[in-house]
Image (cartoon, grey):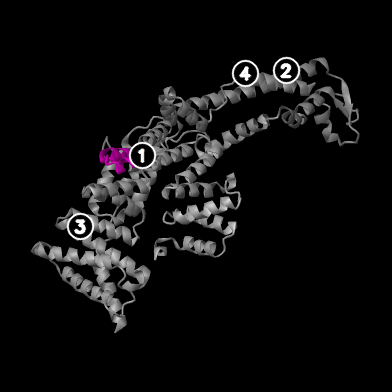
Amino acid sequence: MVFFIGVLRYAGRDLMMGKGKKDPDPINISQDMLKNDELIDLAEIQSEIEGHEYMNNALTRSARFRTNCDFLPPDSVKLRKAYFCRNETGYFRKEVANNPLQAMMNPEMMTGMLKGQFFMTIFNFGLISLTSTFFSGFVNAKMPFPLAQSFRSMLQQGLTLSNLDVRYVSSFSWCILCIYGLQGLQNLITGTGSMKEEMEMMTGGMMGGQQKGGMPGQPKDFTKIFKGEIENYEILTSKFSLEHAEKQVLLQHRHTKKMRF
Amino acid sequence: MADLAIHPDVAEALSIAQKNESSENLIKFIQKVSEKKERSCSEFVLDFAVKLISEGSDILKLENFKVLEEAFLAAIECKALDWANAFLIKINDHIPKSPKSIRYLAMFQEASGNPEEAKNLYRECIKADPEDTAAYRRLAAYLRDSDLVDEAIQTLNKALEMDMSDTQIWFELSDIYLAHMNYKQAAYCFEEILVQKPTNYLYNLKYGEILYSIGGGENLILARKYFSKAIALNDKSTGSTNNSVKAIWSLLETCKKLESMGRKYKDEVNEELIEMCKEKLTKAYSKESKFDIEELK
């Protein structure tokens, strides 16, 4: 019975989550767009939303420049510095709006998870209260092996007979055992393992998310990263490394000449 | 000898493949070409690919996709349009209507003399995915080829907005500017390349040349520094003192020009450098030098 209710719960949850959960495949979209000219504008928006890849690229360029800026003449360094962090018009000064789609998706995901969690608790709570009111005092299973006294609280919840053998299981305990014991089988049947994933997401996402500073699906806050990059530029000290290049060559030349004689 | 220009790994694979024309060796060679992005042995690639097909080898299968790609590019380069068409159909079977296959189709159109068609296809690729820098590059190359330089520069700028860290685009842009004698812009673009690999002697040499072309005393002094750096780097890496003849000549030119520019730019280093360049050049062209011109022919 518990199992059937579990399946029912799965179906109910599916209904509640709706079809909005399905993510469109980005590659498919771009293919479809090629076929249909009317949708081309949409495609542009789509890929703008899809990621701030080009900002990452700008960051790569800036980082590369910062590591090797000693090899450029001082004027060029100043030029680039100005390009990246000039007041108000610099590349890293601009405010980057957070990704609208992802920002929208995130609460949806959250509510979806909450819905699932909500359903689970309601069903379990209902089931447990049902058994404890209607079947309290029933003994409906017997373990085929003897057990120690300490298992009494686990197996004979709802019974107050202290002389009863621990091998007998009360209906209330049986219900709880079934709910948790049959979870794996149920996941197998419904074919998703979604419950387990959800549990992991709930526990892992909450715990790990705080450590990493953001859920895995959360978009990067480029405004913040850009601010950090500007600070990097403020402390950047570049010393033109080719200042004495001529002397170096001459020295090398003299050295080789000496070696020869 | 044409082999001089080929990457040594590719050349090795080529000689093995030529000695023993088993399909394994041939495939290995083509894979090597694709890995090293070697563009100067398309004839061999096409030849081997045709051989592989006539032997009934399975290069048309998905696991040999890279070989197929390389064969298609080689066929286009050799103007073997029938083969190119055959390969393209096969590629399209594997990845139907993907951005890549569409780009290849556009390249095929370009090769077979339908540039307008190709242009439209590239535009469509870009519209579908504004971050597809490969399509931008092809489009820019086509535009440049048909003398629409301004449009080509615009396209490349657009591509750079999408991917600022793409050195190839910076290179192409600097090349266009150089070809149209816009040296300051070219220098800006080339700085991006130099920053990526400041120890490459050719980059230092070329940047020095651009600075020399801009002209003016300050730039000439900078150019002198970069030529010196190039010579130092090359001497260090090759172990010989007179391999970088081009850099030495450039340095000599720069120093002489600085000397003629009056007292302001005249210093001791300049004279010493001229002295050094002369010594190095006489060494390079003397008979005892290892640098043998006959060998290069």
Q: Marks 1 and 2, Cα distance to the nearest angstrom?
A: 65 Å
**On screen, residue A107 above or below A251:** above
Task: Out of B173 and A195, give the one closest to the viewer.
Answer: B173
Disc 3 secondary structure class: helix
Chain ID of residue with mark 1? B
| Position of residue B205 in the picture relative to residue B46 (left or right) | left
* Picture quarter with the N terminus of chain B: bottom left
Tag shown at residue A126: 2
Q: Farthest residue in the bottom direction?
A: A261
Chain ID of residue with mark 2? A
Residue found at x 18% / y 63% = B254
Q: Farthest residue in the top direction?
A: A134
Chain ID of residue with mark 4? A
Q: Is residue A57 magenta?
A: no
Q: Residue A211: give x, y in percent of width and height.
A: 53, 39
Q: Would you name the residue on which mark 4 appears? A: A16
For marks 2 and 3, give the one nearer the viewer. 3
Q: Amino acid at mark 4?
A: Met
Q: Would you name the residue on which mark 1 appears? A: B139
| Position of residue A104 in the picture relative to residue B190 (left or right) | right
Q: Which of the 4 quarters of the picture holds residue A113?
A: top right
For marks 1 and 2, give the one nearer the viewer. 1
Which residues, given as a range, are shown in magenta? B142-157
Circle 4 residues within 10 Å: few <14, some 14–19, many ≥20: few
